[in-house]
Image (tube, rainbow, N blue to C red):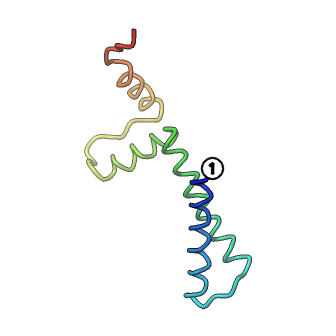
Amino acid sequence: MRHTAIGLSRSLRCFWRGLRESGKSFSLSVCQSWFGRKARRAWRGLREWCGDAAYESYLRSKLTRSRSDRPLTPAEFYVEQLNRRYSKPNRCC
């Protein structure tokens, strides 16, 4: 909890410093756009952390690496991901 409060206060200080340096006055649109960017970034980070954005990451990497073969569909990607995860021996018991 303390870590989050420190990060938030640091972000707010950066926001106010940016307003002062840019010469803009405080307005609702400036505040909304800044908080909107932070919220989108947090949401993107949460999706990456929980694995929900794995297919989008796959497509981005596929476009930069090779254009010769077609990318997998979301269903094919899901099956491939399950096969990759459970094809290794499980030594828990």
Residue that numbered label 1 is attached to: 1
Spot occupied by residue 45 in the image (x, y as percentages of width and height): 52, 50
Which three-letter amino acid code belongs to the residue tagged 1?
Met
Q: Is residue 47 above or below residue 9?
A: above
- Front-most of residues 1 and 70: 1
Residue 32 lies in quadrant: bottom right
Residue 69 lies in quadrant: top left
Q: Is residue 16 above or below residue 67?
A: below
- Front-most of residues 31 and 76: 31
User: From the image, which quarter does the C terminus lie in?
Assistant: top left
- Front-most of residues 29 and 1: 1
Locate residue 52 relative to residue 8 in the image: left or right: left
Which residue shows up at 35% across the image and 25% down it?
Answer: 84
Which residue shows up at 74% across the image and 76% down it?
Answer: 28
Task: Tell me if mark 1 has few (under 14), some (14-19) or many (20+) residues whose alpha carbon lies within 10 angstroms of its own.
Answer: few
Spot occupied by residue 22 in the image (x, y as percentages of width and height): 56, 87
Which residue shows up at 37% across the image and 21% down it?
Answer: 83
